[in-house]
Image: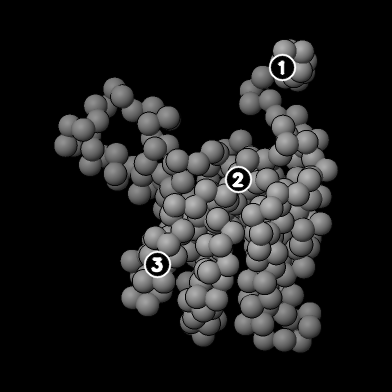
Amino acid sequence: MSKKKQSSDASPAVLPAHIAIVMDGNGRWAKKRMMPRAAGHKAGVAALKKIIESASEAGIKCLTVFAFSSENWNRPEREVAILMDLFVSSIKKYLPELQQAGVVLRFIGDRSVFSDKLKASLQQAETSTQNNNFLNLNIAMNYGGRWDITEAAKKMLQDTSSGAVAAEQINESLFSEYLSLADLPAVDLFIRTGGEHRISNFLLWQCAYSELYFTDVLWPDFNGQELKQATQWFSSRQRRFGRTGEQVEEDAVSEHTK
């Protein structure tokens, strides 16, 4: 993994600053090859490594991936145990490389139910990379968008009860400061692999104005070329944010002539 930034076919002006990915399809990828689901999850880790490299080379500043949702506890107990062990071993294996590449690693979600060993691994990874500044890599584990919003509401209620925040101060901007990833830009491009067309409770607030890109490609097969295709699709989108298409075009012309 290298810090070297390579050229991209998409103009830097229209590259998404923040990409979120639901990494779906590991189990089906393994089943197609008559392999155990664990093999699919290991292949998924390898795919993530390649996407981190590709995102870095393209100049993407923030990448957030859905590794384990709060609903994934409903999966078979053995599969969950394998995933937890895989998290620990993958962090140990790839942390030095991520550190060298200047990646800031952050984990979002409810850690209270994780083992002490896993919690220690997450903390070590965050602490050792916190002063990097090349790519913000956020990994959602035991995360849910509704959980995120609920936790933010609890924190804000505590602050209003203590007098730190007045009720009349509360607005969308202030509320967003209580959410996960509050210091990062909102998600521009949401990618889901594996053929499903759902957000699945991922970054609900942060994805309010995301461009949604769905692909049938299973996650272990999602590579740098697939990511480039997604960002090129993103660059073709007209992002209006409530304005008319004519207003957006006028603003683009005005900006170009400055």
Q: Which residue is mark 3?
A: 124
Specify the amino acid type for callout 2.
Lys
Position of residue 194 in the picture relative to residue 110 (left or right): right
Residue at image position (64%, 23%) is 242
**How crowded is the residue under tag 1: few (<14 C-alpha within 10 Å), some, or many (20+)?**
few
Residue 194 pos. (x, y %) = 73, 63
**Circle 3 sits in a helix, a strand or a loop, which is it?**
helix
User: Residue lying furthest left in this view?
Assistant: 162
Q: Please tell me which residue is depicted at 76% across the width and 87% down the height of the picture.
A: 34
Where in the figure is residue 237, as x and y percent of width and height?
77, 34
Residue 255 marker = 1
The spot of residue 97 in percent (x, y) is 58, 67
Q: Earlier in the sequence, mark 1 or mark 3?
A: 3
**What residue is shown with label 2?**
61
Give whichever of discs 2 and 3 has the lower sequence position.
Answer: 2
* 7 over 75 or under it: above or below: above
Q: Are marks 2 and 3 in contact (CB under 8 Å)?
A: no
Q: What is the spatial separation of the Cα atoms under label 2 and label 3, in whole angstroms? A: 22 Å
Q: Earlier in the sequence, mark 1 or mark 2?
A: 2
**Camera-nearest residue between 230 and 246:** 230
Residue 185: give its label.
none
